[in-house]
Image (cartoon, rainbow, N blue to C red):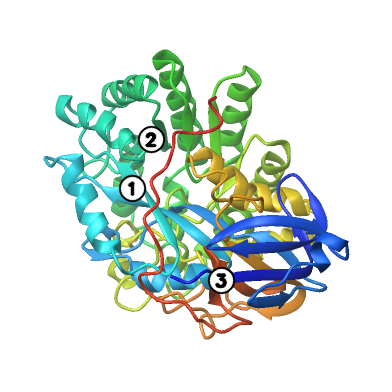
Amino acid sequence: MSSTRTLIRGGLVITAADETHADVLIEDGRIVALAAHGTDVATGWTADRTIDATGKYVIPGGVDAHTHMELPFGGTFASDTFETGTRAAAWGGTTTIVDFAVQSPGQALREGLDAWYAKADGQCAIDYAFHMIMADVNESSLKEMDLLVQEGITSFKLFMAYPGVFYSDDGRILRAMQRSAHNGGLIMMHAENGIAIDVLVEQALAAGRTDPRYHGEVRKALLEAEATHRAIKLAQVADAPLYVVHVSAEEAVAELAAARDQGLPVFGETCPQYLFLSTDNLAEPDFEGAKYVCSTPLRPKEHQDALWRGLRTNDLQVVSTDHCPFCFTGQKELGRGDFSKIPNGLPGVENRMDLLHQAVVEGKLSRRRWIEIACASPARMFGLYPRKGTIAPGADADVVIYDPHTEQTVSAETHHMNVDYSAYEGKRLTGQVETVLSRGELVIDRREFTGRAGHGQYTPRATCQYLL
């Protein structure tokens, strides 16, 4: 391949650490240099392609560390394929996803991983990596964990929820944590007391409470907090690090904050839906609430302040989407008359960077913190930094030109996710992705998709970089 040089001139370069008016020089898919705009060094650079970023932000491509493309769930599949989902991610300024390969009970981790390699191979518009969902913790799968870590699959997701599907009991969780303490892997936890929740589901349905809003009422915040506390204690016993996914409740944030105050290697992720949506959405009439069914569930609005505060104080480190879309027509509708049959998950991979920029506009986050929680921290957490998540010499040229002034209205009519509704329909946002480069190649060029399936490469990961 012939060498191409790209020069991005005149923008405000924002990373988790700095904001500088700098020009960025890219060669052979990597960032090779930055120089202050207008200096002799920068003025002397020549390139095959020059992008004018005057008045714009130049930011690292987003790293979404929690997506589920083509996930089988409740007799159906998530509606985004790796092709449609990664294309939508690019439109939203995300240039790397970490998706979840799934082990089926009774099968080897390797079988699940190979199935996901096959689904994604040649399909992705942006770079991708995998976590491993462990649905069957036994002697053989514990041994396999060591091999996967060596292969660059360095995180393993366990579930305290979904008995009969993904659920692991405390003994199995402890064994997996002990193994990760030795092999350097990171246990990711879906922390909800699924055994207790199933009792409440059964009782609600027996009493005729079948509407989507009851999904939120049975999956109680206290049962998220209890499971978060239990996961932290098990990790402490195993002397292992812990990453709690999709934290939604104030009480669960308090558990994480208390553990971190003790100096424990405990980390937390939240998602845009918990920051911007609430049980008001679940209660929308005419079964519209089904669009907002996900687990952990949306909480009453009062919980949002605690989540924003957690992001500011670093008790929560990462915002991922848990992108797992199901169409309203024909998929979410499977749960008419029984909320427990509504496929769990929301679309969001395209909206995350813009929603978080809106929080910057509203004064909830600084610009650098926006980049930290959306790019740098997820890259560090999952062993991708500094190739991903920053703008620095040697990093992959995953770069977004972001217009902080353009106004947009979120809508299913204009989004690129393969789903028939938007969770943020009609929401007005300030700021929009204008141009996206993935390893130096234009994927979005001034709001036009120029990428292709197969450009995205599988990216093996190192171990968590917060544990050094």
| Quadrant that contains the C terminus | top right
Residue sitting at 44 percent across and 15 percent down? 239
The location of residue 55, given as percent across then percent down, is 82, 73
Residue sitting at 44 percent across and 24 percent down? 230
The three-letter code of the residue at mark 3 reads: Thr
The three-letter code of the residue at mark 2 reads: Asn
The three-letter code of the residue at mark 1 reads: Val
Secondary element at image label 3: loop
Q: Nearer the viewer, mark 2 or mark 3?
A: 3
The location of residue 427, given as percent across then percent down, is 65, 74
Q: Residues within 10 Å of mark 1 (few under 14, many from 20)?
A: many
Residue sitting at 68 percent across and 60 percent down? 59
Residue 144 occupies quadrant? top left
Question: Upstream in the sequence, badge 2 or badge 3?
Answer: 3
Residue tagged by mark 3?
4
Residue tagged by mark 1?
201
Q: Viewer-proximal residue, 108 or 414? A: 108
The location of residue 341, given as percent across then percent down, is 29, 60
Q: Nearer the viewer, mark 1 or mark 3?
A: 3
Residue 13 occupies quadrant? bottom right
Residue tagged by mark 2?
193
Q: CA distance from mark 1 to mark 2?
A: 12 Å
Q: Residues within 10 Å of mark 2 (few under 14, many from 20)?
A: many
C-beta proximity under 8 Å, tags 2 and 3? no
